[in-house]
Image: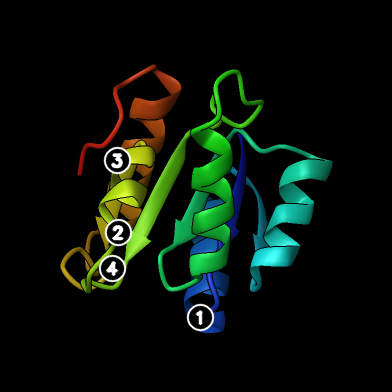
Amino acid sequence: MKILIADADNFFRILLSQLLYDDGYDVTSAHTAGRAWEYLIKDPPDICIFDSGLPEICEMAMEERGRPGSWFSSIPVILLTGGGQVPEAWRNAADFYVEKKRDADGLLPRIEELLGEISNGAGRGRS
């Protein structure tokens, strides 16, 4: 399963990428919205993990997902939040969202659980 991670926090992005890679996932990561969008267009992943702290990718992705018949609407999105205010439209457009601070200790198991639910066709907007 191919996963795209977009997060400006280098330490967190690299750590999460390595942990998911070690669990057998094919991971691509980006530290800027532009780079994430390039990866998304060039080689669409099975699942995206976007940090709300990188608002440009969230805005572009959520806008594209909202278009009827969009190529991106079938790619599940996990939205990572820092616990601050996240636009409701982003939460509604994401398949799942996870608070980094609240779920810090169990973040990886939670993401893996969500990946399993997404690959099994579970619903949108759960946390």
Image depth: mark 3 or mark 4 in front: 3
Which residue corresponds to mark 3?
92
Q: Return the x and y of residue 86 as percentages of the image width and height.
A: 28, 63
Residue depicted at 71% across the width and 54% down the height: 37
Residue depicted at 39% across the width and 17% down the height: 120
Which residue corresponds to mark 4?
100
Question: Would you say 95 lies left or right of 18 here?
Answer: left
Q: Return the x and y of residue 48 as percentages of the image width and height.
A: 54, 45
Q: Alpha carbon of mark 1 to alpha carbon of mark 3: how far?
A: 24 Å
Q: Earlier in the sequence, mark 3 or mark 4?
A: 3
Q: Alpha carbon of mark 1 to alpha carbon of mark 4: how far?
A: 12 Å
Q: Nearer the viewer, residue 91 or 96?
A: 91
Q: Alpha carbon of mark 2 to alpha carbon of mark 3: how far?
A: 9 Å
Element type where label 1 sits in the image: loop
In which quadrant is the C terminus drawn?
A: top left
10 Å neighbourhood of mark 1: few (<14), some, or many (≥20)? some
**For the residues bearing labels 1 and 2, Cβ distance under 8 angstroms:** no
- Three-letter amino acid code of the residue under disc 1: Asp
Q: Return the x and y of residue 103 as percentages of the image width and height.
A: 20, 63
Q: Nearer the viewer, residue 2 or 124?
A: 124
Which residue corresponds to mark 2?
87
Residue furthest out toward the right = 42
- Three-letter amino acid code of the residue under disc 4: Lys
Q: Earlier in the sequence, mark 1 or mark 3?
A: 1
Q: Quadrant of residue 93?
A: top left
Residue depicted at 22% across the width and 74% down the height: 84
Element type where label 4 sits in the image: loop
Which residue corresponds to mark 1?
9
Question: Would you say 121 lies left or right of 21 here?
Answer: left
Q: Is residue 79 above or below residue 32?
A: above
